[in-house]
């Protein structure tokens, strides 16, 4: 009897975020047959009707690009921001099932899982996400899920870009008052906002824009000044590393792991400054004798979604898949 795997297998993968959405049809060799990059698709940040319309548009676009391959899709994995919070998984699945073959496997999950797989290539582990906000999520071998943090900018999101920006502003105002040591952050942040003195920053920060939008970009200057040796900036980053580690450790301790190192994938703009953060996290884990292996993703999250789609139909991808997929994804117009 011929096994199904003897013909090419095709998967539909979706990475839905708060800024943009990517979707591809892909085979086991990393060849791409259709690709869409479009607007956001986070149901917590848009009306449900507009959210549904966006999913329909993506699927119709992919179908039009390659109707023959689309008609033979074996598996679909959609990793989407906000679907867990709104229990919108069934909404997405019902739309996808209107397009794909009846036999296709369809799974809708949090976008954190595809961020994890973009680093571990389908293995269990922990993903620490830190962009404007921050959240920690663990998935074991059975994809049992545990979440730590990420409870919003007003009282959590520790170690995020917003949190680093807040700590930078605190240091600037405390230095101005004489409550804290001088810091090079003062001059760069004044220049950034095009103002002459510290009190003028108040008008910039408490303006019409959302505070997260105004404050999170300041994290860049914390890293810039730390690189130049500013002790206040260095301390802010060290404190952020400790906050990340506390969240990662809490997640680790709530889950059951097999022997060997547990991968911890560091995702988001904060971790672009790897040289500052990874060694500190390794040092903290070593002090606690915890078997953690810190890494950054080797693929974009859409690649993690492709891996998740193949994983759910028990397809093992070849070692060349990563490089082939990356090359084909960049080339595809």
Image (cartoon, rainbow, N blue to C red):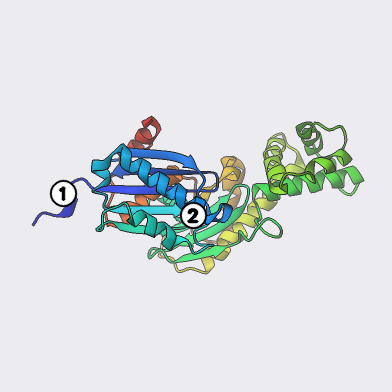
- Where residue 323 sits in the image (x, y, percent)? 35, 37
Q: Earlier in the sequence, mark 1 or mark 2?
A: 1
103 w.r.t. 28: above or below? below
Q: Which residue is mark 1?
A: 6
**Residue 94 visible here:** yes
Mark yes or no: residue 28 visible. Answer: no
Q: Position of residue 49 (x, y in %)?
A: 50, 54
Task: Return the residue nearer the eye: 304 or 10.
Answer: 10
- The single residue placed furthest to the right in the displayed view is 178
- Above-or-below relation of 223 to 191: below
Q: Position of residue 320 (x, y in %)?
A: 30, 40
Task: Examine the image and state in which quarter residue 185 appears.
Answer: top right
How many other residues sit within 10 Å of disc 1, few (<14), some (14-19) or many (≥20)?
few
- Expressed as whole percent of the image width and height from the top left, the position of residue 122 reads 37, 53
> In percent of the image, x 53 and y 48: which residue is there?
267
Left or right, 52 with respect to 167, comes to: left
| Residue at the (30%, 52%) spot, across then down | 100
Q: Residue at x 16, y 49 (%)?
A: 6
Can you say which quadrant of the picture contains the N terminus?
bottom left
Q: Are circles 1 and 2 on residues that touch, CB within 8 Å?
A: no
Q: Quadrant of the C terminus?
A: top left
**Is label 2 in a helix, a strand or a loop?**
helix
Q: Nearer the viewer, residue 80 or 137?
A: 80
Residue annotated with mark 2: 112
In the rendered image of this protein, does residue 331 appear above or below residue 92? Answer: above
How far, Cα to Cα, is label 1 from label 2?
Answer: 32 Å
Residue located 78% across and 31% down the image: 191
């Amino acid at each position: 009897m011929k096994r199904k795997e003897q013909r090419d297998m095709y998967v539909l993968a979706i990475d839905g975020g708060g800024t943009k959405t990517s979707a591809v049809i892909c085979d086991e060799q990393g060849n791409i047959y259709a690709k869409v990059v479009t607007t956001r698709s986070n149901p917590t940040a848009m009306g449900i009707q507009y959210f549904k319309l966006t999913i329909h548009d993506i699927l119709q676009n992919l179908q039009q690009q390659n109707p023959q391959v689309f008609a033979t899709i074996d598996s679909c994995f959609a990793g989407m921001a906000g679907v867990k919070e709104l229990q919108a998984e069934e909404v997405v699945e019902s739309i996808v099932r209107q397009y794909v073959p009846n036999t296709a496997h369809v799974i809708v999950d949090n976008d954190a899982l595809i961020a994890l797989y973009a680093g571990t290539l389908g293995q269990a582990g922990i993903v620490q996400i830190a962009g404007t906000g921050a959240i920690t999520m663990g998935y074991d071998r059975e994809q049992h899920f545990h979440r730590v943090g990420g409870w919003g900018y007003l009282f959590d999101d520790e170690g995020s870009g917003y949190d680093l920006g807040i700590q930078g502003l605190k240091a600037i105002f405390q230095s101005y008052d004489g409550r804290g040591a001088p810091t090079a952050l003062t001059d760069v942040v004044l220049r950034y906002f095009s103002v002459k003195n510290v009190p003028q920053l108040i008008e910039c920060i408490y303006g019409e824009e959302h505070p997260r939008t105004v404050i999170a970009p300041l994290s860049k200057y914390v890293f810039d000044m730390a690189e130049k040796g500013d002790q206040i900036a260095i301390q802010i980053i060290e404190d952020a590393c400790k906050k990340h580690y506390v969240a990662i450790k809490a997640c680790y301790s709530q889950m059951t792991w097999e022997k060997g190192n547990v991968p911890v994938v560091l995702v988001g703009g904060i971790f672009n400054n790897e040289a500052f953060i990874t060694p500190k996290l390794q040092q903290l884990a070593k002090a606690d004798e915890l078997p953690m292996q810190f890494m950054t993703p080797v693929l974009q999250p859409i690649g993690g979604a492709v891996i998740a789609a193949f994983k759910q139909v028990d397809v093992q991808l070849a070692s060349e898949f990563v490089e082939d997929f990356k090359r084909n994804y960049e080339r595809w117009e």
